[in-house]
């Protein structure tokens, strides 16, 4: 029941109408019998939104596009991993001090661990915010990082930052990666026919991960499955980053399967 002791959590982003974060966090709070609610806010200005978090004693927040970088200057402390990535996606309000974390990197890396990352050639498609978090995780785990991106300079900069190399999209055939990770919006509804990585270059045994989860079975994921690759869909990444946020806020590990089912049932 919502009462005067109910704690407030939220997502800060623009736009956030499509966000599934309220769905999973409210479900996790209910399952754990925690008296808290999670709402979605679309502030125009992240500085005043962070002030509101302080003033209203909001206990924690997810931060999403376009504020993951700009939020950083408004916080009291930033975790080493978030500093390394250069982006914050989670705020924790600890007795009035606002702490910043990033759970995106761990969310991408954790599902890859069973396949091994060290010394594997990992091709990341994209060089935006999500790509930065994934590249950081691969670099930390000593994968051989390869970046490909439409805008060449952005791709080169990201590759240089994490000791990787850059490959032009048209030169991907010269590469034989163990792991392919799409961090762009290519393949997302409504443009579901767009392929982030050419299907003809997929081979059995490759691990293919897609950050896109609308649709769940993107063209890339479907093609990879047909070719005998191991696949990790975007919902796995989304749930993992949310679960890590929930852990930071409550210290409790939510049930990933229940959260996944909740999203699938509310599409
Ligand atoms: P996010 O924080 O979700 O990563 P972003 O920072 O806007 O979002 O980055 C989006 C990434 O997807 C970029 O690498 C972008 O390529 P550019 O650097 O060339 O802009 C990539 N991307 C988006 N739409 C694309 C498209 N139609 N074709 C190729 N790449 C695309």
Image: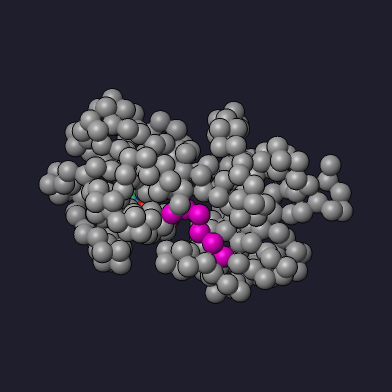
Q: Quadrant of residue 33?
A: top right
Q: Nearer the viewer, residue 156 or 160?
A: 160
Magenta-tinted stretch = 100-105
In the displayed orientation, state which residue is furthest to the right: 4
Residue at horizontal 84 percent and vertical 42 percent from the top: 1
Q: Is residue 185 above or below residue 77?
A: above
Question: Residue 233 is drawn in which quadrant?
Answer: top left
Q: Please give left or right for residue 65 compared with residue 148 in the image.
A: right
Residue 144 visible (yes or no) = yes
Left or right, 55 with reference to 119 = right
Which residue is found at the position 40% from the left and 48% from the top?
A: 109
At 42% from the left and 67% from the top, the residue drawn is: 84
Pick the quarter of the image with the C terminus. top right
Q: Is residue 224 magenta?
A: no
In the depicted view, which residue is nearer to us: 83 or 73?
Answer: 83
Q: Is residue 38 left or right of residue 12?
A: right
Give coordinates of residue 216: x percent, y percent. 45, 33
Q: Residue 5 at x, y = what percent?
A: 84, 53
| Residue 153 % position (x, y) | 26, 65
Which quadrant of the figure has residue 111?
Answer: top left
List x then y, in percent, for residue 140: 35, 59
């Amino acid at each position: 029941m919502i009462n005067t002791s109910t704690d407030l959590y939220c997502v800060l982003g623009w736009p956030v109408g499509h966000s599934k974060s309220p769905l999973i966090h409210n479900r996790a709070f209910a399952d754990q019998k925690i008296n808290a609610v999670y709402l979605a806010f679309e502030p125009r200005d992240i500085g005043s939104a962070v002030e509101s978090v302080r003033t209203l004693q909001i206990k924690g927040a997810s931060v999403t596009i376009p504020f993951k970088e700009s939020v950083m200057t408004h916080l009291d402390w930033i975790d080493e991993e978030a500093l390394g990535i250069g982006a914050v996606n989670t705020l924790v309000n600890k007795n009035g001090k606002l702490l910043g974390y990033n759970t995106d990197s761990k969310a991408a890396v954790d599902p890859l661990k069973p396949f091994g990352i060290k010394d594997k050639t990992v091709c990341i498609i994209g060089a935006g915010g999500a790509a930065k978090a994934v590249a950081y995780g691969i670099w930390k785990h000593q994968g051989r990082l390869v970046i490909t991106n439409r805008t060449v300079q952005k791709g080169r900069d990201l590759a240089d930052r994490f000791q990787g190399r850059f490959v032009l999209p048209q030169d991907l055939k010269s590469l034989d990666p163990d792991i392919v990770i799409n961090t762009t919006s290519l393949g997302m509804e409504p443009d579901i026919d767009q392929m982030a990585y050419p299907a003809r270059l997929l081979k059995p045994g490759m691990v293919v991960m897609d950050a896109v989860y609308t649709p769940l079975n993107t063209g890339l994921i479907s093609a990879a499955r047909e070719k005998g690759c191991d696949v990790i869909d975007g919902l796995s990444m989304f749930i993992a980053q949310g679960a890590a946020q929930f852990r930071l806020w409550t210290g409790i590990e939510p049930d990933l399967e229940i959260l996944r089912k909740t999203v699938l049932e509310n599409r």
